[in-house]
Image (cartoon, helix red, strand yellow):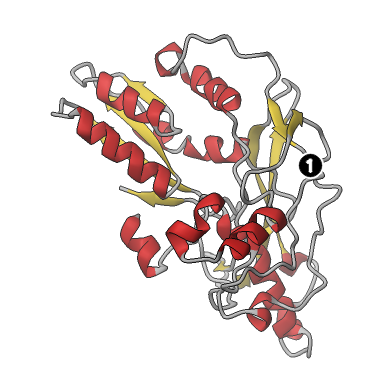
Amino acid sequence: IERSVSAGDTSMCQKGMLFLTDGEADFTEYDFAQTQRKALQFSVALFTYALGSGAQTYITHRLACENKGIFYQLPDHADLSTAMSKYYEYFASGVELCVPSFTRYRDVVTGAELWPACLPSYDRSSGEQELLGVGCIDLNVMADLERMKSESYWEDFICKLSDLSKQCYHLDLSDCRLEKLRRAVGPESSCTDVAWESNCACADPNCQDNANFLDELGYFCDTWVGDDCTRAVEDWGYTAAGQESVLQQCRRSCGRCPQGPCQDGQCQNVEKISSSACRDKLTTRVTPNKITKILMASGFGVQLAW
């Protein structure tokens, strides 16, 4: 993860690491401290899995608890693929996606090029946000894309879809909400004996970034998701004034929104499609505008390291 961040080969959004073991390991206090330091520096959530009756659980449990993750104790012959895919629930629980993500693929039967738009659905009946699934609809159902490609607005249309799909979202996952996710896995995954309140707090939905703000190095607010905005000077070479501007203009991405009761309809005050020019027309600090085949059509932007 450190190498990919340095090289720019990452979405720079939320990052997760999945660690699996079926045995024992020599892990010192220095190792725990180093892991925690690196995980904090690069904003990595650590998901750990102890597989089988012979697997040691102390190290994997502690690694998850100290690094904003979840520990899974799996019996012999457990469905490993299902357990390890549950990291999606973690990221889905902390993100309210208000705009769809887009991708492109070819139909396996007809070979036709299809362009689906995808959004997640949530169950809020328990007072918490639980992922039900992701629904998609192909744009081809509503329009003839081959005809659209010949229109003058096509390039602008594509770059707007690309901007939507590449945007990062702050993970609104308090200690209370994270502990509830752990206890939903099982009592062995809990990291504390504290009895959390029945309803955890959420970030104020009216607290949003300035969508048109560019910081002094030319980055949009959502680029700060996963980074410590209070260390812009030390870690990224910003001026003190530049750091203060980021903290004031990027409150959502920097995790500085006030907490309060969770509410439905958090997308009501969010601009669905920016009325300004496409991002690559405003700054060079963005990746090229193109829709490619991706696996994460739901837009969580998670980077995994194995």
Pointer 1 residue: 205
Q: For the point 64% across and 66% down, which residue is it?
A: 220
195 sits to left or right of 163:
left
Residue 166 visible in the shown view: no
Describe the element under mark 1 as helix, strand or loop: loop
Q: Residue 89: x, y in percent?
A: 55, 35
Residue 120, above or below 168 = above
The quarter of the picture where residue 51 lies is top left
The quarter of the picture where residue 68 lies is top left
Q: Residue 172: x, y in percent?
A: 63, 38
215 sits to left or right of 293:
right
Q: For the point 21% across and 21% down, which residue is it?
A: 55
Residue 47, above or below 195 = below
Furthest toward the left, the residue is 26
Furthest toward the right, the residue is 268
Residue 213 visible in the shown view: yes
* Mark 1 residue type: Pro
Furthest toward the front, the residue is 240
The quarter of the picture where residue 138 lies is bottom right
Q: For the point 60% across and 40% down, which residue is it?
A: 92
Q: Residue 44: x, y in percent?
A: 42, 44
Q: For the point 53% across and 71% down, which residue is it?
A: 292
290 sits to left or right of 126:
left
Q: Quadrant of the N terminus?
A: bottom left
Choose between 84 and 7: the one closer to the eye. 7
Q: Residue 17: x, y in percent?
A: 37, 43
